[in-house]
Image: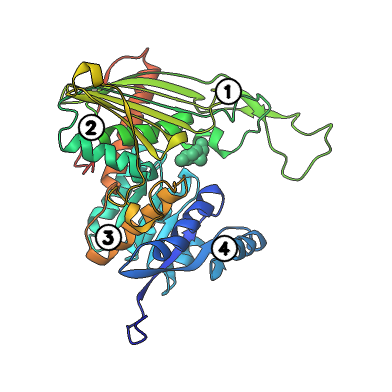
Amino acid sequence: MDSTAAPKQRLGIGMVGYAFMGAVHSQGWRTAARVFDLPSEPHLAAVCGRDPRAVRAAADKLGWASAETDWRQLIARDDVDLVDICTPGDSHADIAIAALDAGKHVLCEKPLANTVAEAEAMAEAAARNPGSIAMVGFNYRRVPALALARALIEVGRLGALRHIRLTYLQDWLVDPDFPLTWRLKRESAGSGALGDLGAHIVDLAQYLVGEPLAGVAALSETFVTERPVPAAAPAPATTRGVERGPVTVDDASLFIGRFPSGALASFEATRFAHGRKNALRLEVNGELGSLAFDLERLNELQFFDGTVPAPEAGFRRILVTEPDHPYLDGWWPPGHSLGYEHTFVHQARDLVHAVATGVQPAPSFADGLQVQQVLAAIEESASKDSVYVTVTPTAATTN
Ligand code: SOE
């Protein structure tokens, strides 16, 4: 080791929220510089949450140097260069806009916001602060197999695209007594399966196809319309869950869409698919071949090369763990597979490079706004007997 090498510059991270997304983002920040050669070293300066004891405990568990209870204080800290937003959607806009206007870089969990108006204000804040990097956390773009799929499509291995079909299925709401948490309320989550799962597959479809959707038609449903209100304090088992409140978001959304190039898309997002835990599956069919992917087998990409003579043709499994595959240069030898959390390490890696070069990474806030517009068009269609709704194009960068 060269003991005379100058210590790397630090990139101070301040994270708001520390539940599931906060935990997995923390892992990304902790690990990125251990795996990849980065221009600066992420420093986990402070994590922020409202409950002082809980946020202190989270800081210790997740590896943050200190804790804050007010996100404005977090943004104001000199040792915070980048604000990572892992809160429910109703606070994304306030935190992101304040951070950008304070000259900080921002990573914001998906979907970018709860409404198009909020997403517009966020994209405007990013545009008026060109010195700040602003990225939205559609982490599945950073699954190596999906980055490879995009590369194969981009170089023309599938030719003109005909179809893309995506499903994102989970089952954690099948129990009608699952409590009425923030994800089931419009005011905190914006929408249900649509914003939580549908946003991912809209972003992925547009990333893979390489252009924004031109329009959509949709159906959505709320199967369980009332759920137990969680007690503020633990209640005796006999009284627990007696009070029920309204579910104000969709449990499932199905939609179809059209791309300007002529490709057709279909989508299904639900939390009611018994046995499907985190089943994001997709298939792309082009004039020259097909690709297929299943997040529950995320090291694999299936490729059918339609130019191979019929007697030898068939889907072949590409094990996406070779050093030449996207993101694999830093990881383990071939065949030593990766998982869900690695996508967040890749996200942190790309963001640190973006900060060092000053080049806005994708998905940008403009991309996040465009996805929000697609979600709004889907909701409009679902509320009008599935009428086809055109999506107004924006200046999104897509990839
Ligand atoms: C919950 O449904 C959830 O955690 C999503 O919010 C994430 O974005 C997705 O990656 C996994 O499922």
Element under label 4?
loop
- Quadrant showing the N terminus: bottom left
| Alpha carbons under labels 1 and 3: distance apart | 40 Å
Question: Which label's residue is closer to the chain start, 4 or 2?
Answer: 4
Which amino acid is tagged 2?
Val
Image quarter for residue 190?
A: top left
Disc number placed over residue 354 in the picture, else none? 3
Task: Note whether 306 is above or below 19 in the view shown.
Answer: above
Tell me what residue is drawn at x 32 percent, y 42 percent.
368
| Alpha carbons under labels 4 and 2: distance apart | 42 Å
Tell me what residue is drawn at x 25 percent, y 21 percent.
313
* Residue 344 point in image, percent of width and height: 42, 51
Q: Which residue is mark 4?
A: 69
* Residue 21 point in image, percent of width and height: 50, 49
Which amino acid is tagged 4?
Thr
Disc number placed over residue 274 in the picture, else none? 1
Question: Which label's residue is closer to the chain start, 1 or 3?
Answer: 1
| Label 3 beta carbon within 8 A of ligand 1 | no
Question: In this image, 292 relative to 61: left or right?
Answer: left
- Sort mark 4 into few (<14), some (14-19) or many (20+) by Cα contacts within 10 Å: some
| Label 1 beta carbon within 8 A of ligand 1 | no
Q: Which residue is mark 2?
A: 209
Given residues 345 and 232, the one toward you in this image is: 345
Which amino acid is tagged 1?
His
Given residues 345 and 174, the one toward you in this image is: 345
Mark 1 touching mark 3, by CB under 8 A?
no
